[in-house]
Image (spheres, rainbow, N blue to C red):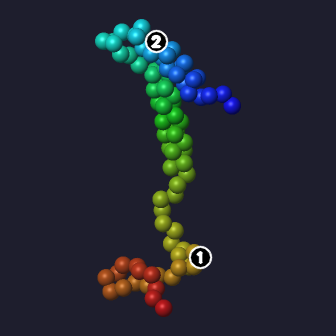
Amino acid sequence: MPDMSASASLAMTHLVTFAKEVDEDKVTPGVLGFIVFAAMALAVWVLMKSMSKHMGKVDFKESPDLKASGEETATDSSGKASPAKS
């Protein structure tokens, strides 16, 4: 297996040379920054559409048939339903 430190130092040499060519007073995200931002915005849009579709399927009305689920409720003196005690 080749020595990885030699290839790493060679890569760093090229990166340092590239960094010297870039104007140090002007920093911009460039095309890669725009692509990453656009991909994240697209992902959020797709997730929001999916969430909206799934929330449309949710029935927020409570079903009155509690015995079908196997739980019985008892009403206490305040009128609030609470789980039955055995």
For discs 2 and 1, the disc positioned in front in the rendered view: 2
Q: Is mark 1 on a helix, strand or loop?
A: helix
Q: Nearer the viewer, residue 78 or 35?
A: 35
Mark 1: amino acid: Ala
Does residue 56 appear anywhere in the picture? no
Image spot of residue 43 (x, y percent): 52, 34
Badge 1 crowding class, 10 Å Cα cut-off, few under 14, some 14 to 19, many 20 or more, is: few
**Horizontal relation, residue 25 to residue 86: left or right:** left
> Furthest residue to the bottom?
86
Residue beneath the point at 51% across and 82% down: 72
Q: Which mark is residue 78?
A: none
Mark toward the start of the polypeptide (2 vs 1)? 2
Question: Is residue 79 something one can see in this rendering?
Answer: yes
**Mark 2, residues whose alpha carbon is within 10 Å: few (<14), some, or many (≥20)?**
few
Pick the quarter of the image with the N terminus.
top right
Q: Residue at horizontal 46%, vertical 85%? A: 84
Q: Is residue 43 above or below residue 67?
A: above
Q: Along the line of sight, which residue is nearer the eye, 33 or 78?
A: 33
Of all residues, the one furthest to the right in this rendering is 1
Residue 18 is marked as: 2
Q: What element carries label 2?
A: helix
Residue at the image point whose x is 50% and y is 49% from the top: 55
Residue type indicated by callout 2 = Phe
* Residue 53 rendering spot, x and y as whole percentages: 54, 44
- Residue 68 circle label: 1
